Amino acid sequence: MAGESLEVAFQLLNERAQTPQRMSEGASGYDVFASLESPVVLEPLTRLSIQTGVSLAIPPGYEAQVRPRSGLAWKQGITVLNAPGTIDSDYRGEVQVLLMNLSQEPVTISPRDRIAQLVFMPTIRVSFRQMSLDDTKRGQGGFGSTGGIQVEASKSE
């Protein structure tokens, strides 16, 4: 799998759109860019869907995961709200990125800003079989059950 190459057909939907780009030789993600007519302000604790002007034809058996850019997260508190978002192989619409501002300050997103990255991953088809499940040491222990921070379930009164 290392060094495997995948051809993904794409379409630029307007004159502001840019081809997704890998920014270094070792990068696993391909940056996508804001396809905006003018800057938009992302206020603190708000979200916006930002268009990229790109549609993809991902081959069957693969998905594209939409992930945050670490620089935006660290420097400006911007993340992809549903990270990782999934673009399925049969979707042909415009790639849009749901950005969220987790900072205390407004952040301006300008045309052609790098707003997220796409990582292409293989998918696995599964079949489900209903049956009784075996027990494990962890059992039904959920959030925090394997150590670290303990999370208490909220109780309705």
Image (cartoon, rainbow, N blue to C red):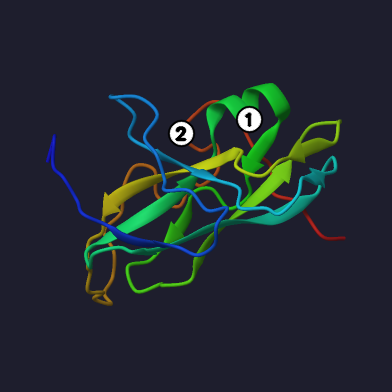
Residue holding disc 2:
146
Residue 125: horizontal and vertical position, in percent? 22, 68
Left or right: 105 as drawn, with respect to 143: right
Percent from the top left, x then y, of residue 98? 63, 54
- Residue type at the position of mark 2: Thr
> What is the CA distance from the residue labelled 2 to the residue labelled 1?
28 Å
Q: Residues within 10 Å of mark 2 (few under 14, many from 20)?
A: few
Q: Position of residue 61 (x, y in %)?
A: 22, 64
Picture residue at 69% right of the left edge, 49% below the top = 153
Classify mark 1: residues with Cα within 10 Å, few (<14), some (14-19) or many (20+): some
Q: Residue at x 39, y 43 (%)?
A: 138
N-terminal label among 2 and 1: 1
| Residue under label 1 | 73
**91 is higher (above) or lower (below) than 50:** below
Label total for image:
2
Is 57 in front, or is 102?
Answer: 57
What kind of element bears circle 1?
A: helix
Residue lying at 53% horizontally and 42% vertically, measured from the top left: 116
Question: Dividing the image into 4 quarters, which one contains the C terminus?
Answer: bottom right
In this picture, is 39 found above or below 123?
A: above
